[in-house]
Image (cartoon, rainbow, N blue to C red):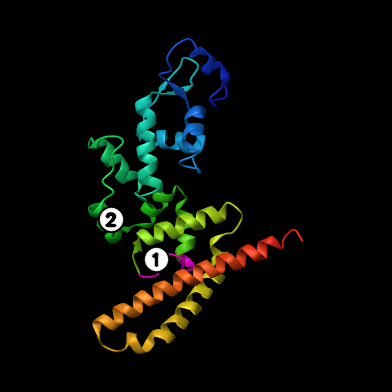
Amino acid sequence: MAVEDGSSRLTMMENGGPKDHYTIGEVVTRLRKEFPTLSVSKVRYLERRRLINLTRTRGGYRLFSPQDVELLKYILTLQDKEYLPLKVIKKRIEGGMPVGTSDSGGDLSRVLEDKTYTREELADAIDSELRFVEELQSVGVVGRGGDLTQRDVEIARMALEMAKYGIQPRHLRGIMAAVEREAAMFKQILNPELRSGDEQRVQDAVNKARHLAAVDSRLKELMMASAIDNFAS
C-alpha cells in the first residue's frame, strides 16, 4: 500500500512542466511555517469533515490544486487564529465566502467576544475529544462563568498543547489555584477603588488589575526561564 507523504515519485511526475498540483506532504511542508501544528492527519481530518474536496490519482494519492491550498489556508486561519468551530467554517464555505478573505475586523471581533459554545462546539474548535473538554470543565479550568466563551476556547487550546507532553486537565488544578490566589491579592490591593461606587474609578481599577496581570505573567515567564536553565546543571 502506497504511503501518502508527498513522495518524490509524484513530485518527479510534475518536473516536466508547470506545477499545478501538490501532494498532501508538500502542502503540509509549505504551510507549516504559518501553521506550525499542521499535520497530514489534520488535513485528512478536514477532508473527512468535508471542508475540502480533493482529487486523487489512480493510486489513491490526494492532490491539491492551488485553489485547494488557498482554501486550506483560509480554513486554518479561521480555525487557528480566529478560533471558529469547524461547523461555522463549513457554513461560510458553503455560503460562498471568497477564499483568501476574512471578515476579521470589528464585526467579527464583537461576534467572537459575545459567542458562546456548547462543549461539543468547543471540542470541535480545538480538534479534541469531547471528553477532554469535559475534564477541563470538571476541574474548573473552563466554563467558570457558566457559559463556554471564546476565552475558554483559547484556554482549552493551550491545555491541549500541554496535554501533548502528558500534562492532563487534572494537573491544571494547581495552576488554577495559583491564579485564584493572585487574583484575590490584586483585588485586595484595588478594593478601595472597586468599592468606591464611582464608575470611572472602578474601571480604572480593572485596568490596573489587567496591567498587574500582564506584569505578573512576564515575571513568571522570566522566573520559569531561569528555572529551566538549571535543568541541565
| Quarter of the figure that contains the C terminus | bottom right
Residue occupying the point 35% across, 38% down? 74
Residue sitting nearer the eye, 205 or 72:
205
Depth check, mark 1 against mark 2: the one in front is 2
The kind of residue on which mark 2 rests is Ser
Report the span colored magenta: 138-145
Residue 218 shown in magenta? no
Q: Residue at x 48, y 76 (%)?
A: 180
Percent from the top left, x then y, of residue 127? 44, 47
Q: Quadrant of residue 187?
A: bottom left
Q: Give the percent coordinates (x, y) of residue 205.
A: 35, 80
- Tell whether 165 sits left or right of 89: right
**Residue 39, position as x, y percentages in the image:** 51, 38
Considering only order in the chain, which callout, 2 or 1, is on the residue closer to the N terminus? 2
Q: Which residue is mark 1?
A: 143
Q: Amino acid at mark 1?
A: Gly
Residue 4 is labelled as: none
Q: Residue at x 36, y 70 (%)?
A: 145
Residue occupying image coordinates x 45% and y 23%: 22
Percent of width and height locating residue 156:
45, 58
In the figure, 27 relative to 14: above or below? below
Q: Residues within 10 Å of mark 1 (few under 14, many from 20)?
A: many
Looking at the picture, does residue 20 appear above or below residue 211?
above
Q: Report if residue 144 lies within the magenta region.
A: yes
How many callouts does the rendering have? 2
CA gap between label 1 and label 2 equals 20 Å
Quick one: quadrant of the N terminus?
A: top right
Mark 2 secondary-structure assignment: helix
Q: Most extreme residue toward the right, as rendered? A: 233
**Label drawn at residue 109:** 2
